[in-house]
Image: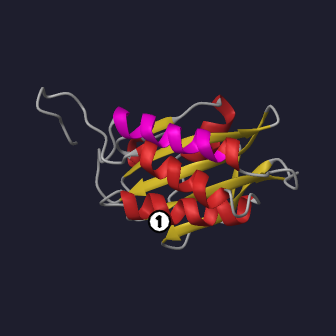
């Protein structure tokens, strides 16, 4: 975990910078598929020690794989299952230092050891999640989670999710 000169947690991603890049790209095309594809690439390029950065989107009452960067992933996840499904069920960010200690963890990639999942909203409902995985245990700090929430908030404002059921 990164620390500043005073020993406080320091984020390893500049959420403001990534958010500004997402917003700029969304000016060209607001459809969720384009924005999320670029956002997953930006997050993957902005954080060290990741093996997955991407999105799951609500379809038919469960999460379906969306744009991502990284290794092969689970195709669908039920609400309430795993870290992503729990983020949707509780409607709150999940910061998991050791996914193997998380009850009900779904091992889409057995190399993943830690994870952050942030819910995405549109029109008063959850439309998906931003999911970031690392092969390192305890890779993410609270500061990282807050920075990813900034990115997610920009995605929520910048994307057209109107065709998601």
Q: Position of residue 2 (x, y in %)?
A: 21, 42
The part of the image, by quadrant, that contains residue 154 is top right
| Side (left or right) of 42 relative to 12 | right
User: 158 above or below 92?
Assistant: below
The part of the image, by quadrant, that contains residue 15 is top left
| Side (left or right) of 23 relative to 50 | right
Asked if the stretch drawn in magenta spans residue 18, the answer is: no
User: 153 above or below 100?
Assistant: above
Asked if the stretch drawn in magenta spans residue 151, the answer is: yes
State the extent of the magenta-drawn residues as a range. Answer: 142-155
Extreme-left residue of the structure: 5
User: 156 above or below 165?
Assistant: above
* Residue 96 seen in the current view: no
Q: Position of residue 31 (x, y in %)?
A: 77, 60
Q: Quadrant of the N terminus?
A: top left
Q: Which residue is mark 1?
A: 109
Badge count: 1
């Amino acid at each position: 975990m990164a620390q500043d000169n005073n020993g406080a947690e320091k984020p390893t991603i500049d959420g403001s910078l990534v958010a500004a890049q997402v917003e700029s790209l969304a000016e060209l095309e607001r459809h969720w598929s384009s924005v999320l594809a670029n956002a997953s690439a930006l997050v993957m390029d902005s954080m060290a020690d990741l093996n997955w950065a991407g999105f799951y989107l609500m379809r038919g009452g469960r999460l379906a794989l969306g744009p991502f960067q990284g290794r092969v992933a689970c195709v669908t996840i039920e609400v309430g299952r795993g870290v992503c499904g729990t983020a949707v069920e509780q409607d709150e960010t999940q910061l998991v230092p050791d996914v193997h200690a998380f009850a009900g963890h779904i091992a889409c990639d057995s190399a993943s050891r830690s994870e952050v999942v942030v819910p995405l909203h549109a029109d008063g409902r959850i439309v998906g999640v931003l999911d970031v995985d690392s092969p390192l245990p305890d890779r993410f700090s609270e500061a990282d989670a807050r920075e990813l929430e900034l990115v997610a908030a920009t995605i929520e404002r910048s994307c057209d999710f109107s065709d998601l059921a």
